[in-house]
Image (spheres, grey):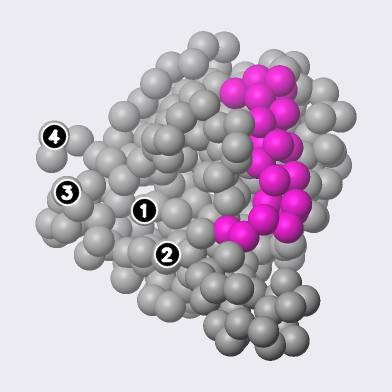
Amino acid sequence: MDKIFTVTDLGDGLWEIADSVGCRCYLVKGSERVALVDSCVGVGDLRPVVEGLAGGLPVTVLLTHRHHDHIAGSYLFDDVRIPREEEVDLGVEEEQNLHARSFYVEQGRAPEGAFWAMSEGRRPNFSHFEEGDVLDLGGVTIEGYFLPGHTDHSMGYLLRERRLLLAGDAVTPCMCLFFPESLPIADWRQTLDKMGEMPFDTFRIGHYSHEFTKDDLRGFIVAADYALSGVRGLSWMYTYIEGLKGSLYISPETPTDDADSPDFRAVIGPYVPREHKRRRRRGTQGAAAGDGESGEER
């Protein structure tokens, strides 16, 4: 593997930093300070990459939520901020990060013997960043907006002058709402409405190198409404946490079957067991009432 990080200059003091696993963070540079929104999964030493772009300016890390594939790199930095309710037992995330590493190596997405920030660094001494808080970088301001759903207090960061939202996992093409800390799909649907009222034109997320527009929210709304319509979802298993599964709802309007495409639209909610109808003999009361004439799943 030639390199761990790929840095893309998005212009106007904004860079995307992608690691070899496919996680992304964003560096925003003002005249007085630099903000790093999220910090990837922790493979490779992120700090010299960030400091090279910062050019000597102090760095503040702003985390969108608690998951290890967003917070791991922050173990290498001093000024790290997170929503208060997202500061939870980091031992859980450290354990999941350790477990996931073997998968990344097996898949060829991380080199054998790689530097891992959660092992080589130290737990951050978090300070808190809440909705309405503003960080002034010098000519660039970043404002926090709660965008709950993926986790109960996920945060998005609005670059008001650029009309750009850095949303983390608050909205993704295959939206994951099956974690214990996730909120119900109906709550995420309200977050989509909130996003529709926010002052941005485009948004970027944590796992796709793609700039979405506010018009793209409609496709996510269709997916959410479909999942809430009472249809039966497909069983789905999570790779990195044994026994964790969900129900997958693929939007009827998704333009592609490629789940890796930024145009894909689906929601994975809490697991809902599929019901089985019992086979009844002809002429029984149930069959006469139209209650299940076959033993097939529905």
Q: Which residue is mark 2?
A: 238
Q: Are marks 2 and 4 in contact (CB under 8 Å)?
A: no
Comparing 36 with 58, the one in front is: 36
Tag 1: amino acid? Gly
> Label 4 belongs to which residue?
2
Instruction: Decide whether residue 219 is among the magenta residues.
Output: yes
Place of residue 117 in the rendered image (x, y in percent of width and height, measured from the top left): 35, 57
Callout 4 secondary element:
loop
Kindly identify the residue that appears in the image at 70 percent across and 46 percent down: 226
**Image location of residue 247, percent across then percent down:** 56, 62
* Dot 2: element: loop
Mark 3 against mark 4, which lies toward the viewer? 3
* Cα–Cα gap, marks 1 and 3: 16 Å
Q: Judge whether 115 appears above or below 91 on screen.
A: above
Q: Residue at x 79, y 55 (%)?
A: 186
Give the secondary structure at mark 1.
Answer: loop
Circle 1/circle 4 CB separation < 8 Å: no
How far apart are the two marked residues, 2 and 1, measured between alpha carbons? 20 Å
Magenta residue span: 212-233
Quarter residue 273 falls in = bottom right
Q: Type of residue at label 2?
A: Tyr
Q: Nearer the viewer, mark 2 or mark 1?
A: 2
Check residue 42 in the rendering and tell me which mark sits there, or answer none.
1
Inspect this view and state whether residue 198 appears.
Answer: yes
Q: Which residue matches tag 3?
A: 108
- Tell me if label 3 and label 4 are in contact, CB under 8 Å: no
Label 2, label 4: how many angstroms apart (C-alpha)? 29 Å
Which numbered disc, 2 or 3, marks the residue closer to the eye? 2
Give the camera-side residue of 39 and 288. Answer: 288
Separation of residues labelled 2 and 3 (CA atoms):
19 Å
Give percent across and percent down for residue 118. Answer: 38, 63
Question: Between residues 76 and 272, which one lies in front from this camera angle?
Answer: 272
